[in-house]
Amino acid sequence: MATVLSGGTPAELAQAPTAQGAADPVRVLFIGDSSRSQHGAVFGVPLVLRGHGSKTSLDHVAEALGTHLAPGVALRVASFAERFLVSPSWVTTREDVRRAFDAVDQTEGGYTVGPSPIWDAVYEGADTLAPEPGRKFMLLVTDGAATANTVGFESALAHVRASGITVHVASTLTSPYARDEWGPSPLTRLRRLAAETGGQYREVGKGGQQPKLWEVLGELMDLCRVDPGHEWDARRAAEGARGNAPKTRTSGSD
Amino acid sequence: MASGVFRRTPNRCGDGVLRSLLPGALAILACLQTVAGFQQTPVFRAGTRVVPVYVTVTGPDGHLLTDLTQDDFQVYEDGERREIAAFSTDPGPITGLALWDVSREMRDVGDRSRSSARSLVAALWPADRLRFGSFSSWEFALSPLLTGDKPTLLRVIDEELWFTLNYPILWSAVMDGLQRLSQDAGRRVLIVTTAGRSTGERRSRGDAVTLMHQTDTQVYAVGFEQPGLSNGMKDMAAESGGGYVVIGPSDDLDRAWAGILDELHHQYLLGFAPSAVDAQRHEIRVTTTVAGARVRFRRAHMGNVP
């Protein structure tokens, strides 16, 4: 068993990044924001594309996820707005990925509707992943501006950590825009969610210098094949040893 | 602080007393319902509808008068005097929806508006319950949590109020809020923090006022000196028997909200049997024999079965 330093304290690795570890099954849950404010980000067809036969963001996203599905990796797809919808089964082929997206479509007339209960979605996503074997990842696409949640951010984060899930975040809101237009940034919690679960935080844009969402998702899918990181495993091991890893869901305040 | 809400004088008669039931009045019973260990809104039970009217009475100095009796009031419907079928000096805890305008109209006072939300939570009385919501053209969102737990409400404020550069769609938000509030049991109060302006609407202020009366909801409007509070929003609050406050840059937020909650908890609850259940608007007027007193009350009911 290897030993690493975590915050200056020796901590045993929960699972060493060995060849055996890399061969574990991998489960990836994609969670896309389908709220009104996220029209066209993943779900919803922008007006300019209607009737023109152009690829929507959803077409690109499904293609990117399908293309980057590695052997041993199984994917489910979820959307959240008024409801949290999860595709019915784990899929492993490119063709099935697109069908999984169709199963969680909650747009109305091509438009996204409803609020943004991001932390409820993360919490329920963790419930979906928790009983699965092997390494577990969440790919979260949102702008971070959460509304209408039953659970708070801290509860969701604790639940994800206790479930051993790594969260990669693709933020559809970029830092310069958030700083200039929003005041208190909704991105802070997204960064924390990724950082404290050993995941990556990336920002995407529709043009200019920002990478496109589907490009970033392809890269994040590739990360789902490998060990999520020594530091994260060490931290989980240390917390497990202290017995302070949160295990139960609490609503309301954190 | 410009205000349609007034200061309170010490209560000389005590609260929590169901003062009287008019003997023989349509066999209507008024009772205070106790559920789950806390006192809820007085519920008028009868085979017929009783129109609830929450009444605020202030003296010439603007302070609340809290020791009036049933005999001090007269109620009129469409100009005709009606018997007061039920009367209480304890209006009960509120079931509130706090709607926050997070559009571009309010963005410059975003931090102060967020602080104001925290002051509202601090001012809640025991057994009051509140749900937060926010609106702009970007999104209309209501918290699923209706609660009196202050840490939970503060968490919702900190995590879910986002001020944006989008447009205000006020009347749609008010109507959606009223619809949601009508599903909650209890004494319904809609609190709207806004500039009172609306853009790109499919619904009108008149529609919102009608729904307000149909759902027996009091409305309180809160604005800031900049960008101000529209007359339309002030008038709606007045029409409901509620009130409004325009908060200045140096005004104490805690004090402002304490004043609103104090008023809500020191209103009189009067009930009368309507002349008809006909889905038509009927004007209400409440007067008092107390010299120099000013009375605020809902201006109408919609002749509907609640």
Image: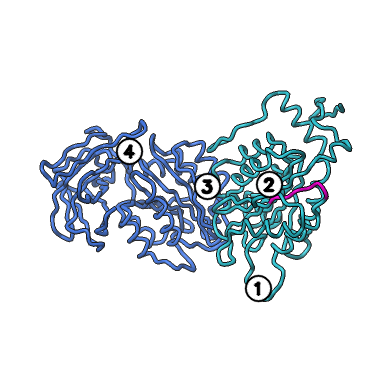
Chain colours: A cyan, B blue
Give the residue type that dot 4 points to: Gln
- Residue A19, located in which quarter of the rendered image? top right
Q: Mark 4 to mark 3: distance in Å?
A: 29 Å
Q: Which residue is mark 2?
A: A190
Residue found farthest to the top: A242
Q: Position of residue B117 (x, y in %)?
A: 48, 45
Mark 4 vs mark 3: which is more N-terminal?
4
- Callout 3: helix, strand or loop? helix
Dot label at residue B114? 3
Q: Which residue is mark 4?
A: B40
Classed neighbour count for the residue bearing mark 4: other residues with Cα under 10 Å, few (<14), some (14–19), many (≥20)? many
Left or right of A39: which side holds A62? right
Give the residue type that dot 2 points to: Leu
Image marks 4 and 3: residues in contact by CB distance under 8 Å: no
Q: Is residue B61 magenta?
A: no
Residue found farthest to the right: A19
Q: Which residues are magenta?
A: A71-76
Q: Mark 1 to mark 3: distance in Å?
A: 36 Å
Q: Nearer the viewer, mark 3 or mark 2?
A: 2
| Majority secondary structure of magenta residues | strand
Q: Which residue corresponds to the image point at 34% horizontal and 34% vertical from the top-left?
A: B35
Label 2 chain ID: A
Left or right of B242: which side holds A130? right
